[in-house]
Image: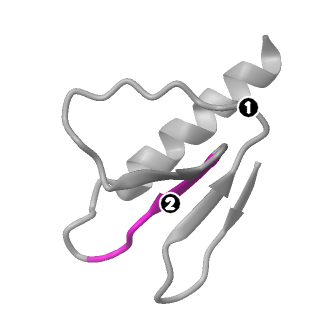
Amino acid sequence: MKIRKVDDKPMVIHTKEKAKIHAHEPKGAKIKGSNIYTVERGPKTAGAIALLLLLELIAIRQRKD
């Protein structure tokens, strides 16, 4: 999984397989295209880092299966 961090731009995650996200409330992440997730950064998206870690754990689990 590749995670690129660029100042003043959304964080972009490229995965080989589509992650299955189950959320009870909307998060700051959006599905941009096939297997590409973007997270808008700012003071109101404090949960964005937790969401990125969750996506990374999902990708690791999928690789093990």
Q: Say the numbered circle drawn on residue 38.
A: 2
What residue is shown at x 32% (from left), y 56% (from top)?
Answer: 28
Identified at 30% across, 29% down, the residue is 23
Quarter that holds the C terminus: top right
Image position, residue 64 (x, y; %) = 80, 17
Structural crowding at the residue carrying mark 1, measured as other residues with C-alpha within 10 Å and reported as few (<14), some (14–19) or many (≥20): some
Q: Residue under label 1, please give it.
A: 17
Marks 2,1: beta carbons within 8 A = no
Residue 3 screen position, x and y as percent: 68, 61
Q: Is residue 48 above or below residue 20?
A: below
Relative to 11, is 46 on the left or the right? left
Residue 41 within the magenta-colored segment of the rendering: yes
User: Image quarter for residue 16?
Assistant: top right
The image quarter in which residue 21 lies: top left
- Amino acid marked by disc 1: Glu
46 is higher (above) or lower (below) than 50 = below
Residue 12: x %, y % from top left: 60, 63
Q: Which residues are magenta?
A: 36-42
In the rendered structure, does residue 57 fall within the stretch colored magenta? Answer: no
Q: Amino acid at mark 2?
A: Thr
Q: Secondary structure at mark 2?
A: strand
Q: How is the image coloured?
A: one colour
> Relative to residue 27, is residue 34 drawn left or right?
right
Residue 22 versus residue 1 in the image, above or below: above
Q: Secondary structure at mark 1?
A: loop
Taking depth in this image into account, of 39 and 64 the one nearest to the observer is 39
Q: Is residue 57 left or right of residue 16?
A: left
